[in-house]
Image (cartoon, grey):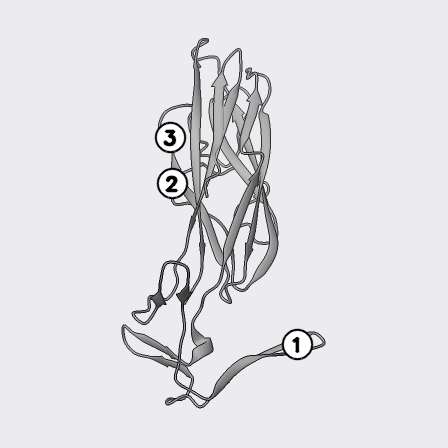
Protein backbone atom coordinates (compact mmCIF):
# COMPACT_ATOMS: atom_id res chain seq x y z
CA UNK A 1 0.00 0.00 0.00
CA UNK A 2 1.43 3.37 -0.98
CA UNK A 3 0.33 6.90 -0.23
CA UNK A 4 2.25 9.80 -1.68
CA UNK A 5 2.60 13.49 -0.92
CA UNK A 6 3.69 15.89 -3.70
CA UNK A 7 5.10 19.34 -3.03
CA UNK A 8 5.32 21.80 -5.93
CA UNK A 9 6.58 25.31 -5.41
CA UNK A 10 7.40 28.54 -7.21
CA UNK A 11 8.05 32.10 -6.15
CA UNK A 12 5.09 33.27 -8.17
CA UNK A 13 3.08 30.06 -8.38
CA UNK A 14 2.87 27.19 -5.93
CA UNK A 15 4.44 24.25 -4.11
CA UNK A 16 2.92 20.75 -4.07
CA UNK A 17 3.89 17.82 -1.84
CA UNK A 18 3.49 14.17 -2.81
CA UNK A 19 3.29 11.87 0.22
CA UNK A 20 3.80 8.12 0.19
CA UNK A 21 3.27 5.80 3.14
CA UNK A 22 5.04 2.45 2.95
CA UNK A 23 3.81 -0.22 5.35
CA UNK A 24 6.46 -2.57 6.69
CA UNK A 25 5.61 -5.62 8.78
CA UNK A 26 8.05 -7.16 11.24
CA UNK A 27 6.45 -10.42 12.36
CA UNK A 28 8.40 -13.00 14.35
CA UNK A 29 10.06 -15.28 11.77
CA UNK A 30 8.88 -18.87 11.99
CA UNK A 31 10.19 -21.93 10.21
CA UNK A 32 7.03 -23.88 11.10
CA UNK A 33 4.57 -21.88 8.99
CA UNK A 34 2.66 -24.18 6.65
CA UNK A 35 0.95 -22.96 3.50
CA UNK A 36 -0.64 -24.05 0.27
CA UNK A 37 -2.22 -22.26 -2.65
CA UNK A 38 -5.26 -21.08 -0.67
CA UNK A 39 -4.36 -21.50 3.02
CA UNK A 40 -1.67 -20.48 5.50
CA UNK A 41 -1.30 -21.97 9.00
CA UNK A 42 0.75 -19.50 10.98
CA UNK A 43 0.74 -21.30 14.34
CA UNK A 44 0.19 -24.97 15.12
CA UNK A 45 0.67 -27.36 18.03
CA UNK A 46 0.07 -30.93 19.06
CA UNK A 47 -2.34 -30.77 21.97
CA UNK A 48 -5.84 -31.49 23.26
CA UNK A 49 -7.66 -28.35 22.18
CA UNK A 50 -7.76 -24.59 21.83
CA UNK A 51 -10.31 -21.88 21.41
CA UNK A 52 -11.66 -18.46 22.28
CA UNK A 53 -14.13 -17.83 25.11
CA UNK A 54 -15.97 -14.53 25.32
CA UNK A 55 -18.13 -12.86 27.90
CA UNK A 56 -19.09 -9.20 28.28
CA UNK A 57 -16.04 -7.06 27.56
CA UNK A 58 -13.53 -9.92 28.00
CA UNK A 59 -12.10 -12.46 25.57
CA UNK A 60 -9.98 -15.48 26.59
CA UNK A 61 -7.72 -17.34 24.18
CA UNK A 62 -6.54 -20.70 25.53
CA UNK A 63 -5.02 -24.02 24.54
CA UNK A 64 -4.40 -27.26 26.40
CA UNK A 65 -2.25 -30.35 26.17
CA UNK A 66 0.89 -28.76 24.71
CA UNK A 67 4.10 -30.72 25.15
CA UNK A 68 5.94 -27.68 26.57
CA UNK A 69 4.69 -24.85 28.72
CA UNK A 70 3.78 -21.50 27.16
CA UNK A 71 5.78 -18.39 27.84
CA UNK A 72 8.70 -16.23 26.83
CA UNK A 73 12.33 -17.29 27.34
CA UNK A 74 15.03 -14.70 26.67
CA UNK A 75 18.68 -15.26 25.84
CA UNK A 76 21.55 -13.01 24.80
CA UNK A 77 20.50 -12.83 21.16
CA UNK A 78 17.40 -15.05 20.97
CA UNK A 79 13.86 -15.12 22.28
CA UNK A 80 11.61 -18.20 22.42
CA UNK A 81 7.88 -17.50 22.53
CA UNK A 82 6.45 -20.98 23.10
CA UNK A 83 2.78 -21.85 23.04
CA UNK A 84 0.08 -21.70 20.40
CA UNK A 85 -1.11 -18.17 21.19
CA UNK A 86 2.32 -16.61 21.57
CA UNK A 87 2.66 -16.17 17.81
CA UNK A 88 2.19 -12.45 17.04
CA UNK A 89 0.16 -12.25 13.84
CA UNK A 90 -1.10 -8.68 14.06
CA UNK A 91 -2.22 -6.32 11.34
CA UNK A 92 -1.38 -2.75 10.40
CA UNK A 93 -3.24 -0.28 8.22
CA UNK A 94 -2.38 3.32 7.36
CA UNK A 95 -4.26 6.00 5.45
CA UNK A 96 -3.32 9.56 4.57
CA UNK A 97 -5.66 12.33 3.53
CA UNK A 98 -5.02 14.27 1.45
CA UNK A 99 -2.05 12.60 -0.23
CA UNK A 100 -1.35 15.56 -2.51
CA UNK A 101 -1.13 18.95 -0.84
CA UNK A 102 -0.55 22.44 -2.23
CA UNK A 103 1.24 25.26 -0.45
CA UNK A 104 -0.08 27.81 -2.93
CA UNK A 105 1.66 30.90 -4.30
CA UNK A 106 4.73 31.77 -2.26
CA UNK A 107 5.87 35.34 -1.55
CA UNK A 108 8.34 37.07 0.76
CA UNK A 109 5.77 38.51 3.16
CA UNK A 110 3.99 35.37 4.38
CA UNK A 111 4.56 31.79 5.53
CA UNK A 112 2.37 29.40 3.56
CA UNK A 113 1.01 26.28 5.28
CA UNK A 114 -0.89 23.16 4.29
CA UNK A 115 -1.69 19.99 6.19
CA UNK A 116 -2.46 16.31 5.94
CA UNK A 117 -3.57 13.63 8.40
CA UNK A 118 -2.11 10.13 8.72
CA UNK A 119 -4.35 7.57 10.46
CA UNK A 120 -2.87 4.34 11.85
CA UNK A 121 -4.64 1.18 13.05
CA UNK A 122 -2.88 -1.89 14.45
CA UNK A 123 -3.70 -4.80 16.73
CA UNK A 124 -0.03 -5.46 17.45
CA UNK A 125 0.33 -5.73 21.23
CA UNK A 126 3.47 -3.58 21.08
CA UNK A 127 2.05 -0.87 18.82
CA UNK A 128 3.55 0.82 15.78
CA UNK A 129 6.24 3.23 14.59
CA UNK A 130 5.87 5.90 11.90
CA UNK A 131 8.85 7.73 10.39
CA UNK A 132 9.92 9.72 7.34
CA UNK A 133 11.22 7.29 4.75
CA UNK A 134 12.83 9.37 2.03
CA UNK A 135 12.74 12.98 0.82
CA UNK A 136 13.49 14.01 -2.76
CA UNK A 137 16.56 16.20 -3.19
CA UNK A 138 16.48 19.89 -4.04
CA UNK A 139 13.85 22.50 -3.42
CA UNK A 140 13.63 25.00 -0.62
CA UNK A 141 16.21 25.16 2.19
CA UNK A 142 15.39 23.08 5.28
CA UNK A 143 14.49 25.05 8.39
CA UNK A 144 17.37 25.04 10.90
CA UNK A 145 16.37 27.52 13.61
CA UNK A 146 13.07 25.99 14.73
CA UNK A 147 10.90 28.56 12.99
CA UNK A 148 9.90 29.06 9.34
CA UNK A 149 10.00 32.84 8.94
CA UNK A 150 8.53 35.09 6.26
CA UNK A 151 11.29 36.61 4.14
CA UNK A 152 13.65 33.66 4.69
CA UNK A 153 13.85 30.67 2.36
CA UNK A 154 12.82 27.81 4.64
CA UNK A 155 10.78 24.62 4.59
CA UNK A 156 9.68 22.46 7.53
CA UNK A 157 6.74 21.02 9.42
CA UNK A 158 5.08 20.67 12.82
CA UNK A 159 2.76 17.96 14.10
CA UNK A 160 -0.03 17.19 16.55
CA UNK A 161 -1.76 14.06 17.80
CA UNK A 162 -1.60 11.85 20.89
CA UNK A 163 1.14 9.68 19.34
CA UNK A 164 2.97 12.45 17.47
CA UNK A 165 6.65 12.90 18.30
CA UNK A 166 6.98 16.26 16.55
CA UNK A 167 6.60 19.61 18.27
CA UNK A 168 3.36 21.49 17.67
CA UNK A 169 5.17 24.85 17.76
CA UNK A 170 8.82 24.28 16.77
CA UNK A 171 9.41 23.71 13.07
CA UNK A 172 11.41 20.62 12.15
CA UNK A 173 13.27 19.89 8.92
CA UNK A 174 11.76 17.06 6.86
CA UNK A 175 14.64 14.56 6.78
CA UNK A 176 14.94 10.86 6.01
CA UNK A 177 14.44 8.44 8.94
CA UNK A 178 12.99 11.15 11.19
CA UNK A 179 10.58 9.54 13.74
CA UNK A 180 7.06 10.97 13.38
CA UNK A 181 4.87 8.98 15.77
CA UNK A 182 4.80 5.83 17.88
CA UNK A 183 2.52 3.88 20.18
CA UNK A 184 3.37 1.01 22.52
CA UNK A 185 0.16 -1.05 22.29
CA UNK A 186 -2.70 -1.89 19.95
CA UNK A 187 -4.66 1.17 18.84
CA UNK A 188 -7.51 2.17 16.56
CA UNK A 189 -7.55 5.42 14.59
CA UNK A 190 -4.39 7.06 15.84
CA UNK A 191 -4.39 10.39 13.99
CA UNK A 192 -1.21 12.35 13.30
CA UNK A 193 -1.77 15.79 11.81
CA UNK A 194 1.21 17.20 9.89
CA UNK A 195 1.37 20.90 8.97
CA UNK A 196 3.95 21.76 6.30
CA UNK A 197 5.35 25.30 6.18
CA UNK A 198 7.21 27.17 3.42
CA UNK A 199 8.63 30.65 2.94
CA UNK A 200 10.91 32.33 0.39
CA UNK A 201 13.37 35.21 0.44
CA UNK A 202 14.26 37.95 -2.03
CA UNK A 203 17.16 35.79 -3.22
CA UNK A 204 14.93 32.85 -4.13
CA UNK A 205 15.02 32.66 -7.96
CA UNK A 206 11.85 34.28 -9.34
CA UNK A 207 11.31 31.36 -11.71
CA UNK A 208 12.08 28.68 -9.14
CA UNK A 209 9.62 25.83 -9.21
CA UNK A 210 9.65 22.20 -8.27
CA UNK A 211 8.03 19.23 -6.67
CA UNK A 212 9.02 17.42 -3.48
CA UNK A 213 8.23 13.76 -2.91
CA UNK A 214 8.13 12.56 0.69
CA UNK A 215 7.63 8.95 1.74
CA UNK A 216 6.83 7.62 5.20
CA UNK A 217 7.37 4.14 6.63
CA UNK A 218 4.94 2.57 9.09
CA UNK A 219 5.79 -0.64 10.91
CA UNK A 220 3.99 -2.69 13.52
CA UNK A 221 6.19 -3.35 16.54
CA UNK A 222 5.87 -7.12 16.42
CA UNK A 223 7.99 -9.19 18.76
Instruction: List the residue tagged with mark 2.
Output: 176
Q: Which x, y percent locates residue 157?
A: 52, 36
Instruction: List the residue tagged with mark 1.
Output: 58
Residue at left 41%, top 59%? 38
Q: In whole angstroms, how far apart are the C-alphas of marks 2 and 1?
A: 42 Å
Ranked by sequence position, the earlier of labels 1 and 3 is 1
Q: Which x, y percent locates residue 121?
A: 56, 54
* Residue 136: numbered disc: 3
Single out the residue that lies furthest toward the left: 77
Q: Nearer the viewer, residue 5 or 27?
A: 27
Q: Visible in this render: residue 61?
A: no
- Which class describes the residues within 10 Å of circle 3: few (<14), some (14-19), or many (20+)? few
The relative height of residue 193 versus residue 127 in the rendered view (above or below) is above
71 to the left or right of 148: left
Q: Visible in this render: residue 65?
A: yes
Mark count: 3
**Tag 3 and tag 2, C-beta contact below 8 Å:** no
Front: mark 2 or 1: 1
- Which class describes the residues within 10 Å of circle 1: few (<14), some (14-19), or many (20+)? few
Q: Nearer the viewer, residue 164 or 185?
A: 185
Indicate the secondary structure of the residue bearing disc 2: loop
Ranked by sequence position, the earlier of labels 2 and 1 is 1
Indicate the secondary structure of the residue bearing disc 1: strand
The relative height of residue 128 versus residue 203 in the rendered view (above or below) is below
What is the quadrant of the C terminus in the image?
bottom left
Ranked by sequence position, the earlier of labels 3 and 2 is 3
Amino acid sequence: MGIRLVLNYSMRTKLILLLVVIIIFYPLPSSSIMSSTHYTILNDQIGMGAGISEGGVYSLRDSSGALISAGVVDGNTYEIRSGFYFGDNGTLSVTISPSTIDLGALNTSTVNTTETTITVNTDSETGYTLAVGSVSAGGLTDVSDGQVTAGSEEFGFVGTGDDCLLSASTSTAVTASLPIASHSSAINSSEINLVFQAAISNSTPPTASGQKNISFTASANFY
